Image (cartoon, rainbow, N blue to C red):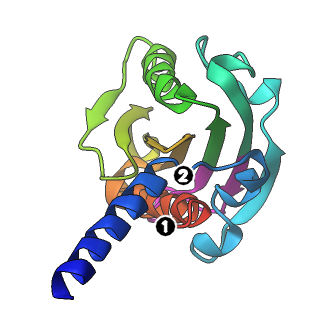
Amino acid sequence: MTRRLAALAALTGLLAVGCGADQKVVKADLPRLVLQPRDLPTGFVQFDAGKQVQADATGRERADAQRFGRLGGWKTRYRRRGSERTPGPLIVESRADVFEGKGAERDLDAYRSDLQALAGPDGAQSVESPSLGDETFALTRAQGTGLLRIRLYTVVWRRANVSASLTATGFDRRFRFAQAVALARAQARRIDSALGG
């Protein structure tokens, strides 16, 4: 009897793993794959949310709304008042795109290429990526000098058939990568939840 139970448990485990590999997010899930107001610290106000449109396109490789079997995309943007003495981010953008097949993998590569190109002559520096989803990369760049120097962090990841990004901006001396990662993790939890994880 014990051997039968062990064999049944093993089979159940294999089936669960097999089902998990086929998990997909559907287009209708898009609005809940991005940060929601309660995911951000007090003081943030949402100033843009909805379907990604052509005006939201950044970069050359990701400009095509039909790229790589893309089913749709969603974005939300937040801001709060602050000065060069305000700790943490002042502007936050959260995005998610859903794809058919392996499109999210190709989109991650396109993200990397486009972000490097957009960084311009000063370039963007890679930072140690947090563990989010199936693949992750993160970049940072700064603009300006002195007390008004601005720091921007972008974390991009793929989970199943979703590509997602979190971009946050704040004053360089008061904004740390860990603060951007905390927001990215909040968004990643939303994607995991949509996948039933």
Q: Amino acid at mark 2?
A: Gln
| Residue at (57% x, 64% y) in the render | 190
Disc sitting over residue 23 in the figure: 2
Residue density around tag 1, few if under 14, some if 14–19, many if 20 or more, within 10 Å: few
| Residue at (37% x, 17% y) in the render | 122
Q: Dot 1 corresponds to which residue?
A: 197
Q: Percent position (x, y) of residue 188?
A: 49, 58
Whether pointer 1 and pointer 2 mark residues with C-beta atoms closer than 8 Å, the reply is yes
Q: Nearer the viewer, residue 107 or 114?
A: 107
Residue 21 belongs to magenta span = no
Q: Nearer the viewer, residue 85 or 134?
A: 134
Residue density around tag 2, few if under 14, some if 14–19, many if 20 or more, within 10 Å: some
Disc sitting over residue 92 in the figure: none
- SS for callout 2: loop
- SS for callout 1: loop
- Asked if residue 145 lies left or right of residue 40, the reply is left
- Asked if residue 179 lies left or right of residue 162, the reply is left
Residue 80 belongs to magenta span = yes
Q: Nearer the viewer, residue 99 or 58?
A: 99
- Residue found at the very far bottom of the displayed protein: 1
Q: Percent position (x, y) of residue 106?
A: 49, 22
Q: Percent position (x, y) of residue 19?
A: 48, 56
| Residue at (57% x, 56% y) in the render | 90
Residue 181 occupies quadrant: bottom left
- Residue found at the very far front of the displayed protein: 1
Residue 162 occupies quadrant: top right
Q: Amino acid at mark 1?
A: Gly
Tell me which segment is drawn in magenta.
75-93
- Asked if residue 167 lies left or right of residue 127, the reply is right
Label 1 and label 2: CA atoms lie apart by 10 Å
